[in-house]
Amino acid sequence: MKTLMLSAAALAMTASIGFAQTVRMGTEGAYPPYNFINDAGEIDGFEREVGDELCARASLTCEWVKNDWDSIIPNLVSGNYDTIIAGMSITAERDEVIDFTQDYYPPTASAYVAAAEGVDVTGGVVAAQTATIQAGYVAESGATLVEFATPEETIAAVRNGEADAVLADRDYLVPLVEASGGELVFVGDPVPLGGGVGMGLRESDGELRAKFDAAITSMKADGTLNAMLDKWFGEGTGTY
């Protein structure tokens, strides 16, 4: 009996050590080029590449977990994964619920896209993804906000006339506008929002946050992060 108890304790300790070395990376998998599901059914994109490199530098093992955007913070807090790495802008409101690393994507502008020039983005109907800083901005702008669970649905709302325009990260919108053959156009002025994109972690995981912060710092210092930014978002994006 004592032998069995000792064996069980040893197994528990081994499992605990293994868990400490493995980090579950939560992402949406629906926001290219930040993150998306490739033809092989795997999580891909800028944040997959960055996240794998961060884990390697921090001597951690990454496991990738896909989660819908509208529940991505609650499921981090409840322990379904250990980080959020999903194009999430650092904001004071979110920082009250979770912690953030330093940014791995510099502060950038959001933008409006419509099906035609001359759309009234301050008084019309504007689509945004639920629980984003863009949705919060539209709600306070005087426009009528319509929210959707996925970024694809916000674009579809513009195409089918359900919304006059969509507000989203400009970097997400650029390839869609370029591929639309003139069906989608940028309108209005760019809107600077947020403090850059960072990894979200539980407030209790200060040690893990410190490891990722150190890894991000090293990637900025040796130029690796700038190279990845330029690869996924175009030359000149990397400004660290």
Image: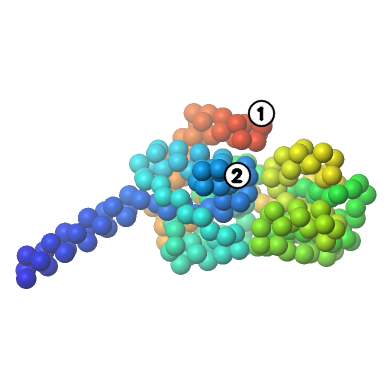
Residue farthest toward the front in the current orientation of the protein: 39
Pair 1/2: label in front = 2
Tell me where residue 116 appears, x and y as whole percent: 89, 48
Q: Circle 2: is it few (<14), some (14-19), or many (20+) Cα within 10 Å?
A: many
Query: What residue is pinned by disc 2?
Result: 34
Dividing the picture into quarters, in which one does residue 157 lie? bottom right
> In the shown orientation, is residue 189 left or right of residue 209?
right
Q: Amino acid at mark 2?
A: Tyr
Name the residue located 47 percent from the left edge and 54 percent from the top edge.
65
> In the shown orientation, is residue 175 left or right of residue 224?
right
Of helix, strand and loop, which one carries label 1?
Answer: loop
Name the residue located 74 percent from the left edge and 48 percent from the top edge.
110
Tell me where residue 149 appears, x and y as whole percent: 66, 62
Which one is in front, 53 or 41? 41
Name the residue located 57 percent from the left edge and 54 percent from the top edge.
28
Query: What residue is pinned by disc 1?
Result: 235
